[in-house]
Image: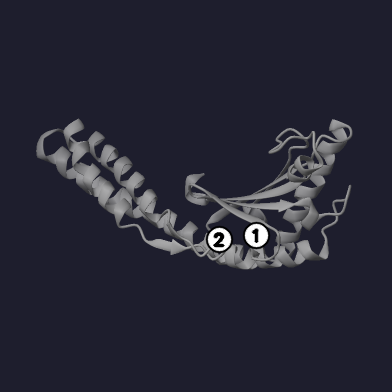
Amino acid sequence: MTKYFRLALPLAAALTLAACSTTNPNTGETQRSNTGTGAAIGAAVGAMAGMVSGDGGSSSRDRALIGAAVGAAAGGGIGAYMDRQEEQLRQSMQGTGIGVDRQGDNIILNMPSSVTFAFDSSDLTPAARSALNDVSNVLQQYPETRVNIAGHTDSTGAADYNQRLSERRASAVGNYLSQTGVAGTRLSMTGYGENQPIASNDTEQGRAQNRRVEITLTPIQQQ
């Protein structure tokens, strides 16, 4: 079985090398898309699945190669889908103060409270509404993603109050996206209070980074 798995590895490698490069609209730098990576992973997984269904001999080899090809197509398709969505979001978020990050097939929008909410408030600012209109327009073009919205605070004040505030802020973002046309079935809103800091709460700069809403987009195929 192992030797047939090795047969699929060159295919996975070739797909990775053939991955299309894209230009980051924010930096102008050329970067590799995730399409090839997804295709390579899909090829390896498909090869293994093909071998498991085989009965030895040439049939195992054939199933491994067929499985690699099918898996590559599926993996590459997800990567390409998220690549296109990421590119549109980066273009739409330029100048808004909202960061766009890519982790594997997931896209994360980091919305600092300086952009989204006034101090101790869960009412969206006009700037936040404008940015979320653009986010909503992109999301409606890519319905095969789930939208996970997480509210976060710094550690100032009582923990139970911060928890409720983070929940209200996550809900405010989710409800607005729903009102602007994103299907409610795609949306998940969660508040984490002060429990998931990304910086030190000992400085004002760190606390400002911790006060945020993150929107994580994940392919529905992963669920």
* Nearer the observer, 206 or 149: 206
Residue 202 tag number? none
Residue 183 tag number? 1
The picture places residue 137, in percent across and down from the top left corner, at: 63, 68
- Which residue: 51% across, 65% down? 28
Q: Along the horizontal axis of the image, is 7 left or right of 159?
A: left
Asked if residue 206 shows in the view, the reply is yes
Question: How far separated are the C-alphas under marks 1 and 2?
Answer: 8 Å
Q: Along the horizontal axis of the image, is 153 left or right of 217?
A: right
Above or below — where is 85 with respect to 47? below
Quickly name the residue at label 2.
143
The picture places residue 114, in percent across and down from the top left corner, at: 80, 54
The picture places residue 16, in percent across and down from the top left corner, at: 32, 51
The picture places residue 72, in percent across and down from the top left corner, at: 32, 51
Amino acid type, residue under disc 1 in the picture? Ala
Other-residue count near label 1 (Cα within 10 Å), few / some / many at <14 / 14–19 / ≥20: some
Q: Secondary structure at mark 1?
A: loop
- Which residue: 33% across, 55% down? 73
